[in-house]
Amino acid sequence: NSGANHVIGYIGADFEGVTAKVTYGRHSVLGNQYGLSVSGSFDATTVTAFGRRDFAGDTHYGLGASYDLGGGASLVGGIVRDGSLGGFTRADFGLNFSF
């Protein structure tokens, strides 16, 4: 309804346990955004990293990992640096259950 257009696209590739994605978005009023993510699985461990620049020009990046404990349970954790509003860092760690 605002008359603005927002288009987002990505290119991704999977090769030997590693997945990579590059994203790009164009908003007719706010400008451009783009990002990169890479995830790799090695035995029961998965590691993921990403970086992103948003419409405001703020940069965000993070690193996470999970370890499959079996039976639908995983040990997971991550840390993210948010570049907006002066920047701050958040972290989490815990168990994930999937049934």
Image: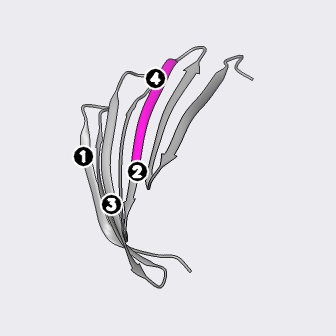
Q: Which amino acid does the dot numbered 2 rest on?
A: Ser
The amino acid at mark 4 is Phe
Q: Nearer the viewer, residue 70 or 8?
A: 70
Apparent side of residue 94 relative to residue 89 in the rendered image (left or right)? right
Q: The C terminus appears in which quarter of the rendering?
A: bottom right
- Per the model, the C-alpha gap separating discs 4 and 3 is 27 Å
Label 4–label 3 contact, CB within 8 A: no
Question: Does dot 3 land on a helix, a strand or a loop?
Answer: strand
Label 2, label 1: how far apart the Cα atoms are: 21 Å
Which residue is label 4 attached to?
Answer: 55
Which residue is most to the right?
1
Disc 1 to disc 4: CB gap under 8 Å: no
Q: Dot 2 corresponds to which residue? A: 39
Colour theme: one colour
Q: CA distance from mark 4 to mark 2?
A: 24 Å
Query: Residue most toward the bottom?
Result: 71
Q: CA distance from mark 1 to mark 4?
A: 20 Å
Q: Amino acid at mark 1?
A: Thr
Residue 52 position by quadrant: top left
Quadrant of the drawing holding the N terminus: top right
Amino acid type, callout 3: Ala
Tag on residue 65?
Answer: 3
Per the image, the residue denoted by label 1 is 89
**SS for callout 2:** strand
Q: Earlier in the sequence, mark 2 or mark 1?
A: 2
